[in-house]
Image (spheres, rainbow, N blue to C red):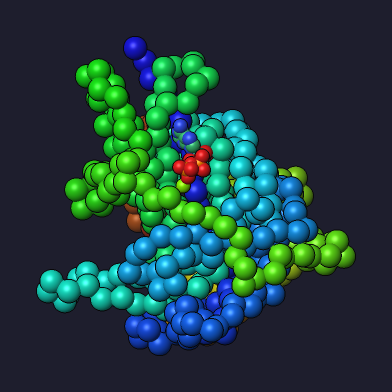
Amino acid sequence: MEFEPVIGLEIHAQLKTKSKIFSPESTEFGGSPNSHVSPICLGLPGVLPVLNKEVLELAFKAAIALNCELHPRSRFARKNYFYPDLPKGYQISQYEEPFSTGGWVEIGTNGSTKKINLTRIHMEEDAGKLIHENHGNSSFVDLNRAGVPLVEIVSEPEIASAEEAVEYMKKIRSILRYIGVCDGNMEEGSLRCDANVSLRPKGSDKLGTKAEIKNVNSFRYVQKAIEYEIKRQIISLENGEEIVQETRLFDSNKGVTFSMRSKEEAHDYRYFPDPDLLPVVIEEAQIQKIRNSLPELPDQKLARFIEEYTLPEYDAGVLTSTIEIANYFEDCLKTHNNPKIVSNWIMTEVLRELKEEDDDIESFPISPDKLGELLNLIGDGTISGKIAKEVFEDMLSSGKTANQIVEEKGMTQISDQSELENVISQILANHPGEISRYKAGDQKLMGFFVGQVMKETKGKANPKIVNEILRKGLSD
Ligand code: ADP
Ligand code: MG
């Protein structure tokens, strides 16, 4: 029998607030352990949580951008379980009355697009972190993350492969980053997911029993964990075994998933409305304000870049992959008006450099207007594309402008007809042998002659004019 995978993701995204969801401590990553804690997030007796207004705004922003149905009135609930990283003994989350349901995103899958529907988004607080390394047999607890605001974005079980799951997660990340709701930093845990995986006979519309892989925190691991899990379940089914509903973990060193707990050991969370928090009510006018504050989203920008700048879809995809790159591109166009040239330079030189330096484009030493100025020098024939790459390197190391560098180093392209004719006739006179071979049909020697001219002019000869003169000279 042939099986098909069915996957649903629960993505946890940290909202980009300064302080926690119900208390004033910092959410900043990397503080020394337990330095961002207070009686509120520790759940000491007698304290009362108060909802951070910013959380509500960011959560609604996310829901609007993800096409969700908004619920102006929602409620926080307590999810009760015991674990050492959860100081209160319950997590404040939303359960029966989330602030948003439904919604969808579109993903690209081998050439076409597919809509993935969402079940819901709700707000909740993060738990702390257990540290098992470096302390012998002891485990340590860092509660800096406890009470950090999250949205949980739950998808319908409509994802059909590991690749689609990665595309889906990338799309969610891209949108959340565009709208400034989440920094998307997966290494720091700002974005992670639980992947639910099941199999069913191909073409069936009944869901099979799922396994949930907890807390996967990179695209690579999402891919690998799901691929492994699909294989594991196929083997079980082919052996006539039943899949048990369970929670599993991914071991990234071994590339395998392993059981953490089965359904029998599953928690009964005993959800109930949190009596310490009022229902959340947001006015229509405020929702409208949030809606109006949303920037152009990735898909819209992509479509516009293709249309307005007549760029290939590939280019538009790269340029709109983050809002910062898109802004850099459009800022560059304010100085240099050929979109395809700007696109080529960003996609090759700029992005390569950023990758090598592990830098982001906002702190890139060559500002968009400076890159535009360099491209103008190619456009008006002052320098060749080849020289421009040297100038680019120089701009990076010296911080000087393209004009300065070209002037100081005398790099201006030689386009003067008679000057180039002089150089070329000299070269031709010195290579009678090559000339006769060329005339006898060895066309490849054209490259040799151009190379000689470039050597003689230190790369400054205008290649178009050189080619014209050479062709004429060699056909005489
Ligand atoms: P749970 O109660 O175990 O958390 P939910 O029904 O709330 O399960 O679903 C959690 C996630 O699991 C959702 O993203 C959903 O799409 C996905 N899911 C549910 N059933 C299946 C299944 N049979 N196969 C794959 N994914 C599933
Ligand atoms: Mg779940």
- One can see residue 380 in this view: no
Tell me what residue is drawn at x 44 percent, y 72 percent.
88
Up/down of 209 relative to 367, above or below: above
Of the pair 357 and 189, the residue shown nearer to us: 189
Q: Residue 292's quadrant in the figure?
A: bottom right
**Horizontally, is 152 left or right of 67 in the view?**
left
On the image, the x and y values in percent for residue 163 come to 44, 38
On the image, the x and y values in percent for residue 397 come to 43, 81
On the image, the x and y values in percent for residue 62 come to 66, 58
Q: Give the farthest residue toward the right.
A: 285
**Horizontally, is 311 left or right of 77 in the view?**
right
Up/down of 52 relative to 348, above or below: below
Up/down of 124 relative to 436, above or below: below
On the image, the x and y values in percent for residue 473 come to 51, 47
Q: Quadrant of the N terminus?
A: top left
**Horizontally, is 346 left or right of 431 in the view?**
right
Tell me what residue is drawn at x 29 percent, y 24 percent.
242
Q: Give the farthest residue toward the left.
A: 136
Q: Residue 338's quadrant in the figure?
A: bottom right
In this figure, what is the number of numbered marks?
0
Tell me what residue is drawn at x 48 percent, y 86 percent.
38
- One can see residue 155 in this view: yes
Of the pair 426 and 30, the residue shown nearer to us: 30
Of the pair 404 and 174, the residue shown nearer to us: 174
Of the pair 112 and 187, the residue shown nearer to us: 187
Tell me what residue is drawn at x 77 percent, y 65 percent.
281
